Image (cartoon, coloured by chain):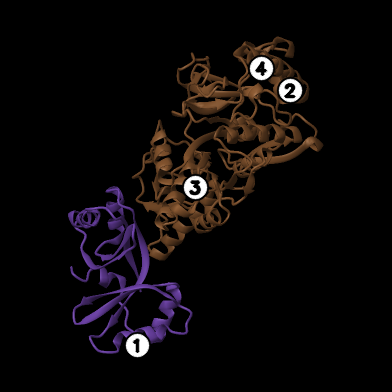
Chain colours: A brown, B purple
Amino acid sequence: MIWNETKECMSRDEIYTLQSARLAKMVDRVYHNVPFYRKKMQQMGIEPGDIRCVEDVNKLPFTTKDDLRENYPFGLVAVPQSEVTRVHASSGTTGKATVVAYTRKDIATWSECVARVLAMTGMTREDRIQISYGYGLFTGGLGVHYGAEHLGATVIPMSSGNTKKQITMMEDFGATVLACTPSYALHLAEAIEEAGMLDRIKLKTAILGAEPWTDNMRRELEKKLNINAFDIYGLSEVMGPGVAADCLEHKGLHVYEDYFLPEIINPETFQPVAPGEVGELVFTTLTKEALPLFRYRTKDLTSITYDKCNCGRTMARISKFKGRSDDMLIIRGVNVFPSQIEAALLEMGETSPHYMMVVDREDNLDTLEVLVEVDESYFSDEIRELENLSRRISKVLKEALGVAVKVKLVEPKTLERSEGKAKRVIDKRTLY
Amino acid sequence: MIVKQLSVFLENKEGRLCDAIETLSSNGINISALSLADSTEYGMLRMLVSDPESGVKVLKAAGIPAKLTDVICLKAAHKTGALSRILKAFMGKGIAIEYMYAFAAGENASVVMKTSDTEKAIEVIKESDIEAWEAETIYNINA
């Protein structure tokens, strides 16, 4: 079902006209309300009047996660505090979170986007959706929650974790739709299989996101649970889940272009690449009130097509992701940067800051092992002390990263040094 | 009374223990007592050697993390109850025995002991009739 046919099936001309008008209006508003962008535009010698149509977007400055961090927490907010009705946050590169803000209208737009995604999967108000994304500062839980309520479905706000309880509630409440990360869905699927509960649950759809996954993984999940599985994409900086999602055709994720203007650029030259070519995905928000962003660099690598989809929608589609243009990892749905580990070890000061991350997947749950060198002169020769040290490091890293870490102490000078491009990460998962 | 023990951190990797021992022998350092503690991921090799200072140097040069630890060495006769007599001397004195291992030296057995408070342990020994080895004697025990 198409939730908003007038928008989702507009002609390309109509999309162009709508985007151009919204872009010009947004740039004008941002120029007058966000000193950060005004200064940048002045430095580049551009005025709001220079931005009149979609093509003009490449005159605008880029925005990065660092810009958000440097303006922590509310430096880029374009409305008075009284207009902000919600904040969310995600992890940053060096401990400081990236904070995002929403007005009442922003939340309504977000709910509209998520309702479109849910309808696209065939979900209706008759459905019961179990939301097993984390609730809280993470956008996953509440984002899908509001969209599902907007659609009129019955929401089961489970939040993440506690697999046994998840399955019990799924059976007792007759959940027909599951929303969580793809790896957790697979973990749940196997737990359901093991418990022999497959014929007692009524799931028919899974809407999965917050981490990259492959088509093979989708097919495996669909077969295991006898469901249709869909990919939902989003990032808190741009909005949260619901920026794009795939339809039953599974031939790319539809981007809600009436709200977000996508570009694909070469991450080295910053020049646009042709449709179909792989590059970094960049978003300019077109209607966001609280946190409008110019050309936000997602660092996700993908390609785009503007061809009409067999499902009838005209909104551009981005391909499944091909990787990242930075070193960010997504572990259990949490964004992790290797530099966070180095910063935490340096701050702790009890070991050398040399480390190696080993990311793997056991029983469909991501695992993170961090190899840390013991300090040559100050290690203790008591096993108990060394074990305490491992535990302390693991606690510090868990606090810094937001994911559980297994620490392994290794001999000094056995890990590569960071001069040049030391390999700090071994990712054994198949994500792209 | 303080004896310098050579402590070596070993990753659980094939050949690591052999590397350490070989490094010592090729530098003419003799081992008179040895204990190997293990965890799932690494081992801790503790040794009394003929020249602890050089031991640390040659091991570090070979890329094997090593350090010196203060321990005490006590004589225990080859007689039932000898060890318990030693342990009883430490009881109620607020001294924890972190680890311990034994070796034979001449007619007597000996125990190497790492305590939570070496100074205090030495006082206890002086007040008791327990016999301790002098460091120099231990280093040259097999010379």
Residue A329 coordinates in the image, percent (x, y): 47, 38
**Kind of element beneath mark 2:** helix
Residue type indicated by callout 4: Gln
Residue type indicated by callout 2: Val
Q: Residue at x 56, y 52 (%)?
A: A174
Q: Are marks 4 and 2 in contact (CB under 8 Å)?
A: no
For residue A6, say whether it is visible.
yes
In the picture as drawn, the residue positioned furthest to the bottom comes out as B80
Instruction: Give left or right: position of A260 versus A320.
Output: right
Task: Evaluate whether label 1 is on the same chain as label 3.
Answer: no
Query: Relative to the observer, which residue lies in front, A215 or B9?
Result: A215
How far apart marks 1 and 4 lie (CA) works out to: 89 Å
> Between disc 2 and disc 3, whose residue precedes?
2
How far apart marks 2 and 3 lie (CA) works out to: 39 Å
> Between disc 4 and disc 2, whose residue precedes?
4
Q: Does residue B5 lie above or below A11 as drawn?
A: below
Query: Relative to the observer, which residue lies in front, B11 or A110?
Result: A110
> Between disc 4 and disc 3, whose residue precedes?
4
* Residue behind mark 4: A19
* Residue behind mark 3: A345
Number of other residues with Cα within 10 Å of mark 1, as a class: few under 14, some 14 to 19, many 20 or more: few
Residue type indicated by callout 3: Leu
Q: Quadrant of residue A21?
A: top right
The numbered disc on residue A30 is 2
* Residue behind mark 1: B85
**Kind of element beneath mark 3:** helix
Q: Does residue B27 lie above or below B33 as drawn?
A: above
How far apart marks 1 and 3 lie (CA) works out to: 45 Å
